[in-house]
Image (cartoon, helix red, strand yellow):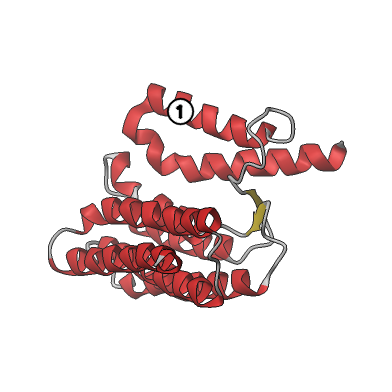
Amino acid sequence: MKKHIPNILTSLNLAIGSAGIFYVLTTDYNYAFYFVIVAGVFDFLDGFAARLLNVKSEMGKELDSLADMVSFGLLPAFYMMKMLDNSSEFYWIGLLIAIFSALRLAKFNLDDSQLDSFEGLPTPANAIMLTSLLYLGYQLPELTLIGIVLMSSLLLVSKLRLIALKFRSFGWRGNEARWILIIGSILLFLVFRWTFVPLLIPFYIVVSILSSVTLKRG
């Protein structure tokens, strides 16, 4: 029975993402962020359960990518299309999010080097960045939204090395960048509240770049 637990959690990720897409297209696209967060929780739990129970499998790996494609690829793509549909005839450009998310996930599955760090922006992080734009409190101009779509698409398949929040130990040494990211995010959230949420992923990228530069100099 225990070997099925991770796949059940992955299936819940898929179900939440599918429900989010339905909700975005039929009801209120501003709720996309909440579906992404809940799907992200199940995405974390399935990997955690697989490691804890020692029941990793190739089927689980493939199912995880399929679920991520729905929750963190299609869902934010439709969200951006709905946002652009209010102000632009180029709303279809939001589909780039789905295309580049698929490329990112395929690339990740073939790359065994992304254990302690990621190459390119992970799809869950990208989905959080896009669907949290509502917390800025105002409607972004058409060209800004298109620019965000293009930028995030490129980040997904970029060569940028980004921090993976995978702790081998919880000490400071060797985890400096991870702790700076976590503590800094908490402090900035306490200061700026929900308006910081759309800036969380850019902050993550900046900390990752600074960490990479520091390591190269060291």
Does residue 87 appear left or right of residue 169 in this picture?
left
Residue 7 spot, x, y in % from top left: 41, 68
Q: Which residue is drawn at 34% across and 72% down?
A: 90
Q: In this view, does 80 lie above or below 110?
A: above
Residue 76 spot, x, y in % from top left: 36, 63
Which quadrant of the structure image shows residue 169? top right
Which quadrant of the structure image shows residue 39? bottom left
What SS does tag 1 mark?
Answer: helix
Q: In this view, does 78 lie above or below 178?
A: below
Does residue 24 appear left or right of residue 77 in this picture?
left
Q: Which residue is drawn at 50% across and 58% down?
A: 47
Residue 73 spot, x, y in % from top left: 41, 68
Does residue 101 appear left or right of residue 218 in this picture?
left
Three-letter amino acid code of the residue under disc 1: Ile
Observer-nearest residue: 99 or 163?
Answer: 163
Which quadrant of the structure image shows residue 177? top right
Q: Which residue is drawn at 45% across and 40% down?
A: 199
User: Can the viewer see residue 141?
Assistant: no
Q: Quadrant of the N terminus?
A: bottom left
Observer-nearest residue: 214 or 61?
Answer: 61
Which residue occupies the extreme left position in the image?
27
Mark 1 lies on residue: 186
Which residue occupies the extreme right position in the image?
218
Q: Which residue is drawn at 49% across and 72% down?
A: 60
User: Can the viewer see residue 212?
Assistant: yes
